[in-house]
C-alpha cells in the first residue's frame, strides 16, 4: 500500500482535535499511527490572527497486518466477482465510490453468512474534510456485528475502508453504522457531556469520563468546545485514554 493511501492530513482548531479527528476517520488508535505536527496553529487575540492546526497521520506498517492482508484478499475477490469493473453494474448517476463500497460490504456480509439490508451513499463534506462514504446496515439480530465496545463494527469499517481505498486509488473517509448504533451512541455521549459539564460548572471540581476510543472522545470535545465555563481535555494512554472536564482558567 502506497504512502499516499496510508497518510492522512487533518486540519482542526487544535493539534489534539486534529489528531482525534484523524483517528476517528481512520478508525485507529494512537498506537497504530505516527503523528506529524505540520502546523501547531495559533489562537489569536479577540479572534484575530487565528490559524488552525494541521497534522499528518501515517498508519504504521506493522499495525493491523492481519486486517490489511484480509483486505487485499477480499479486494481481489470483489474485483473478480465484479468482472474487474464493478462500475459497470451501477446506475449511471451513482458515484464510483458508492458502487465499490456497496459491492465490497455485500461481499463481506455474504462471506459472513449475514443477511441484511445495505444502504450506501455519499455524506456531506465541509471545508476541511473529504466527502465521506456512509454505509447503513439494517437487519435482525445484528448486535454481534457491533461487538463489545464497538470492536467488531470498527474492524469491519477499517477493512472495508482499506478495500474501497485500494479500489478507487486513494484514501477516503468511510463510516459503517449498524441498526443506527453510532447515531444512538453519539446522542448518548452528547447528553453525557452536557450533564458532566453542568456538574463541573456547579461544583467547580473536575470530572473524568470512562476511557473511550478516539471517535467517541472527539464527540465529547466537539460538544463542549464552545462551553462558556468548562473545557474538555484527553488524558492517559490508549486504550485507557479518557476525557477530563474541568473549569476554564
Image (cartoon, rainbow, N blue to C red):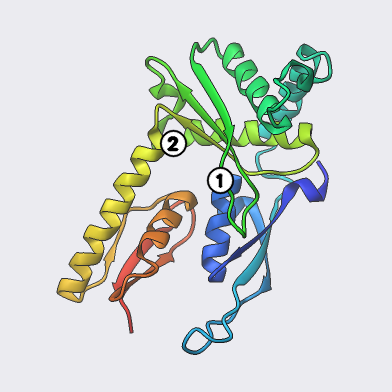
Query: Who's the residue at 65% across and 39% down the image?
Result: 64
- Circle 1: is it few (<14), some (14-19), or many (20+) Cα within 10 Å? few
Quadrant where the C terminus is found in the figure = bottom left
User: In the image, is 62 to the left or to the right of 137?
Assistant: right
Q: Is residue 47 above or below residue 168?
A: below
Vertical relation: 182 (above or below) 73: below
Q: Which mark is residue 150?
A: 2
Q: What residue is drawn where x is 52% and y is 64%?
A: 17
Name the residue at 61% across, 72% down. 53
Q: Are marks 2 and 1 in contact (CB under 8 Å)?
A: no
Q: Residue furthest bottom?
A: 45
Q: Mark 2 against mark 1, which lies toward the viewer?
A: 1
Q: In the rendered view, would you say 30 is above or below 139?
A: below
Residue 11 lies in what quarter of the image? bottom right
Question: As rendered, which of 241 and 169 lies closer to the eye?
Answer: 169
Q: Position of residue 142 (x, y in %)?
A: 41, 20
Q: Which residue is mark 1?
A: 124
Q: Nearer the viewer, residue 247 or 120?
A: 120
Left or right, 195 with reference to 184: left
Quadrant position of residue 37: bottom right
Residue ID at (61%, 17%): 106
Q: Position of residue 54 (x, y in %)?
A: 65, 68
Amino acid at each position: 500500500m502506497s504512502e499516499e493511501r496510508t497518510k492522512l492530513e487533518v486540519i482542526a482548531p487544535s493539534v489534539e482535535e486534529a489528531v482525534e479527528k484523524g483517528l476517528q476517520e481512520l478508525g485507529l488508535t494512537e498506537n497504530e499511527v505516527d503523528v506529524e505536527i505540520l502546523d501547531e496553529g495559533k489562537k489569536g487575540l479577540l479572534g484575530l490572527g487565528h490559524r488552525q492546526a494541521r497534522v499528518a497521520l501515517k498508519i504504521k506498517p506493522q499495525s493491523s497486518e492481519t486486517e490489511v492482508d484480509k483486505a487485499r484478499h477480499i479486494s481481489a475477490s470483489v474485483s473478480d466477482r465484479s468482472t474487474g469493473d464493478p462500475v459497470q453494474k451501477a446506475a449511471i448517476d451513482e458515484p464510483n465510490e458508492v458502487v465499490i463500497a456497496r459491492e465490497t460490504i455485500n461481499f463481506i456480509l455474504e462471506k459472513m453468512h449475514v443477511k441484511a439490508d445495505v444502504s450506501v451513499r455519499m455524506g456531506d463534506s465541509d471545508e476541511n474534510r473529504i466527502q465521506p462514504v456512509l454505509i447503513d446496515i439494517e437487519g435482525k439480530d445484528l448486535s454481534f456485528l457491533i461487538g463489545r465496545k464497538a470492536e467488531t463494527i470498527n474492524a469491519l469499517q477499517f477493512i472495508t475502508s482499506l478495500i474501497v481505498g485500494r479500489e478507487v486509488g486513494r484514501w477516503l473517509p468511510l463510516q459503517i453504522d449498524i441498526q443506527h448504533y453510532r447515531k444512538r451512541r453519539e446522542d448518548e455521549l452528547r447528553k453525557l457531556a452536557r450533564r458532566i459539564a453542568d456538574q463541573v460548572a456547579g461544583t467547580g471540581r473536575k470530572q473524568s469520563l470512562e476511557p473511550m476510543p478516539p471517535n467517541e472522545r472527539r464527540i465529547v470535545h466537539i460538544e463542549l468546545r464552545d462551553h462558556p465555563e468548562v473545557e474538555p481535555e484527553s488524558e492517559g494512554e490508549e486504550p485507557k485514554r479518557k476525557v477530563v472536564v474541568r473549569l476554564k482558567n
